[in-house]
Image (cartoon, rainbow, N blue to C red):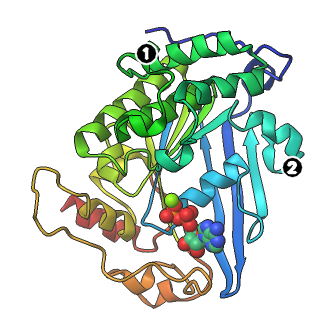
Amino acid sequence: MTSSPIRFVPGGRKALRDWRDDTKPLLKVDDLHVEFRTREGVAKAINGVSFDLAEGETLAILGESGSGKSVTAQAIMGIIDTPPGYVTGGRVEYYGTDLLAMPEKERQSVRGAQIAMIFQDSLSALNPVLPVGWQIAEMMRIHWGMNKSDAMTRAVSLMERVRIPGAAQRVNAFPHQFSGGMRQRIMIAMAIALDPAVLIADEPTTALDVTVQAQIMRLLEELQDERQMGLILITHDLGVVADVADRIAVMYAGRIVETGGIYDAYAAPSHAYTRGLLDSIPRHDQKGETLYAIGGLPPSLTRIPAGCAFNPRCRYATDDCRVGAPPPLVEVRPSQWSACLHAEEVIADAQR
Ligand SMILES: Nc1ncnc2c1ncn2[C@@H]1O[C@H](COP(=O)(O)OP(=O)(O)O)[C@@H](O)[C@H]1O
Ligand SMILES: [Mg+2]
């Protein structure tokens, strides 16, 4: 498999080679803050999220529903719904350039072309009344000014690349004529059409059955390897990404509470919340078995508890955990960072 794709961007747009800077990380999110100003109050959705992503690396962002995973992705893409959503602080750097400070017009040339995203719901993300090939080709026509027949030819080869059987014949078919798994492949073809350097997949397989999930994950892994993209996999199911991710970032109430190599977190989680997520991985081989679930519910983001936001649900919590500012991420093992005051105890329990 080739590891160095040619990233050719016709039409005078700023190409990847113009952005790339070997002294800067591919993507760096620094102290990101996002809030939603609603009638019920201000929901503090993202409260100081920082991470970076290297070329060829896969970062899994994990957390229960409502923890801020999608909002983080939307902030990186520059597609936060405003109002009610506002980025109130931080930076999102692409090879050192802060995307948040960029005028919308310039941002548009980054979105989709340099940083692309696939969504969970392929049916609502694709246009139901347009043939799939046309939708893929449109990306190249708009961003690159490619002519229709060249764009259609490339659309077919992208459909072949994501292994849609009979791509040449099905290029004019409509989204509803494909299965959920095949539609997700079409979404992937659209996302890689412009050779992005970063691909964000937000729960890409949640709507699919287990076998198809695994196939889609394998395809993403393969494409990433071939193109050396930075890949962000967002999921609530650690089981799905365990074989694919290099690092994880576990989110709770809009913060990263544990981050590091996936193997370390798997072997011995250092935050009680990560431990809970691990214990609740669905066991696909044990259908019907009652699953462990973390007791209680995530907090309302308009009233996040003082101290560690997880404290009301945590069996390790002590008085220290219930007061003051949230505990910062601390390196508790080489390359394993935890925001839990009882990290040592949590690790020790996992190793028991
Ligand atoms: N469009 C919106 N309007 C109001 N609040 C929102 C909106 N989108 C997200 N939020 C808030 O941000 C929180 C995190 O959302 P999200 O990032 O989508 O969670 P998830 O981790 O499930 O992807 C939500 O629980 C909600 O409080
Ligand atoms: Mg989400």
Amino acid carrying label 1: it is Gln
Q: Quadrant of residue 143?
A: top right
Marks 2 and 1, the one that precedes in the sequence = 2
Q: Can residue 330 be seen by looking at this rendering? A: no
Q: Residue at x 62, y 56 (%)?
A: 72
Q: How many marks?
A: 2
Assess whether mark 1 and mark 2 are in contact (beta carbons under 8 angstroms). no
Which residue in the protein does label 2 denote? 101
Quadrant for ligand 1?
bottom right
Is 339 or 118 nearer to us in this picture?
A: 118
User: Residue 320, image x and y in percent?
Assistant: 49, 86
Residue 160: image quadrant is: top left
Q: Which mark is residue 24?
A: none
Q: Is residue 351 left or right of residue 327?
A: left
State the residue in front, 239 or 9.
9
Q: Nearer the viewer, residue 247 or 232?
A: 232
Picture coordinates of residue 34 (x, y %)?
70, 66
Tell me if the residue at label 1 has its CB under 8 Å from ligand 2: no
| Residue at image point 79% right, 39% down | 108
Per the image, the residue denoted by label 1 is 169
x, y percent for residue 1: 43, 9
